[in-house]
Amino acid sequence: MDIRDETRTEADRDEQELARFGYRPQLQRSLGLFSSFAVAFSYISPSTGIFALFGLGLTTVGGIFFWSWPIVAAGQFIIALSFAEVASHIPIAGSVYQWSKYLSGKTHSWYTGWIYLFAGMLTITAVAVTLPIALIPALNGMGWNIANSFHNQRIFALVFMVVVTLLNIYGVRAVALINNVGVLFEILGMVVFAFVMALFHNHQGAGVIFDSGSTNVTASTFLVAMFMSLFVIYGFDTAATLAEETRNPRKEAPKAILYSIVGAFIIGGIFIWATLMAIPNLNDGIKSAMSPAAIIDANFSNAFATTYLVVVSIAIFICLMAIQANVMRLCFGMARDEQLPGSSALRTVSPKLRTPWVACIVVTLIAAIPLIQYAGATYLAIAATGMIYLSYALGGLAILRARLKGWPKRDAPFKLGKWGIPVSIAGLVWGGAMLVNFAWPRAASNPTPNQTGGSLDFHWAWLNDRPVLWSVVIVIVGVGSAYFWLVQRKKPSHIEAPEGELVADAPPATAV
């Protein structure tokens, strides 16, 4: 058989599979395994999170914070195993929203999707403002003179949000090409910097990961130190969100989900270890909350340090593009089911570019709103990450509920078999513990606005006394609940699937 005929047969099979779920093909199915992996890896982006929050881990428990990396990677991998299996059964744009819809029902899936949608938009904002924190010093290293102020960070963030919006509207092929090159650049850059530091600038020795320096290591402080790793290792379900644009998604999406975590764990772990070894003086580094950029600057010439910042800036830009690609497809997936305000517009797909361009623009506009009250990337990261873990927990509950009712009854390329229920339970225990960690009221990880030294002000005394994450969750869930119970509750939900993909008590199939 001719290769073109084989490809066409595969494409026909993928489109028929989508039709069995009651959807017509609208998006361009052009991604292979590497592109799917690369988008998920870019969302995780070890460079972005390590650059942003390395200092938090270092100042809290010294070099011992390294051990948060394998612990978080292992916990998230357990969750990813369940997600990979469900992605192999339900290859539709929307990840946890769609999975909850088919495995639990309308109300559960709506809340899961609503929380994940706003968590994703907050993540866009958090990453967009992290980009100028790396880029402005890089430009200054090249001879520019730009103040790294909140005002300038806000302007840069808005510009790059517009750029990635245009790229994502242009099409998934262009995004995949840029993303693939960017991922290779990030991986090579991190590995090269890591080996150069470890081989030629090893001031602390390999045992630095057992050295707490001048810090006091307790269970409480270690939980705070975990926040860098927690902020990095999520978003792996992006490979499933792009399932309708991936060839043979039942087989390739699960691989991409798991490979993205493994890849990020290896590359990020090597870089963190090498960076810790390159700290000239551990106690001084702890006192000054030394960042990777400062550590590299202390060991190398200005040109080398500037090169590192350029590599990080590229990685953050690619990360921003991948996150927006994820969130716009979730928005499209929910709108296609008539689950959002203005769904008829949000589900619009360009017939020429085959991208949900309206959803893309709206996602960017809403993501820009927090910049009005911008007080630093840290507070955005706290709110975004906490809500992501909440939506993952809701998705995990839907999966466990379905497993206890006998799902899956149909075979799929990736399956956990008898390990399904234990893996789901372990994932929920891990996710639940981390939700408590996120929500715990403390100045280091979930401060009140009054604990930020005046940089964050909600202009309401009562709200300024409440932890940031609590306020964000209450507002988003509160507004969502009012909309759902007043408008959405009585609307039909699109639930249609191949035989064996629904749980026993799933609602009857209805078309929207």
Image: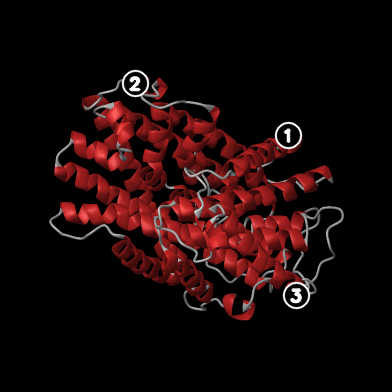
Secondary structure of the residue carrying tag 3 is: helix
Disc 2 target residue: 206
- Label 2 is placed on what type of residue? Ala
Residue 104 place in picture, x, y as percent: 77, 55
**First-in-chain label (3 vs 2):** 2
Q: Is residue 364 left or right of residue 26?
A: left
* Mark 2 and mark 1 residues within 8 Å of each other at the beta carbon: no
Residue 299, label in figure: none
- Label 1 is placed on what type of residue? Pro
Disc 1 target residue: 422
Single out the residue that lies furthest toward the right. 505
Q: Residues within 10 Å of mark 2 (few under 14, many from 20)?
A: some
Disc 3 target residue: 486
Single out the residue that lies furthest toward the left. 143
Nearer mark to the viewer, of 2 and 1? 2
Q: Which quadrant of the figure contains the N terminus?
A: bottom right
Task: Please give the name of the residue rendered at 57% of the width and 54% of the height, measured from the top-left corner.
Answer: 466
C-alpha separation, residue under disc 2 versus residue under disc 1: 36 Å
Task: Please give the name of the residue rendered at 58% of the width and 58% of the height, measured from the top-left corner.
Answer: 471
Tell me if I can see residue 24 in this picture: no
Pick the residue in front: 134 or 346.
134
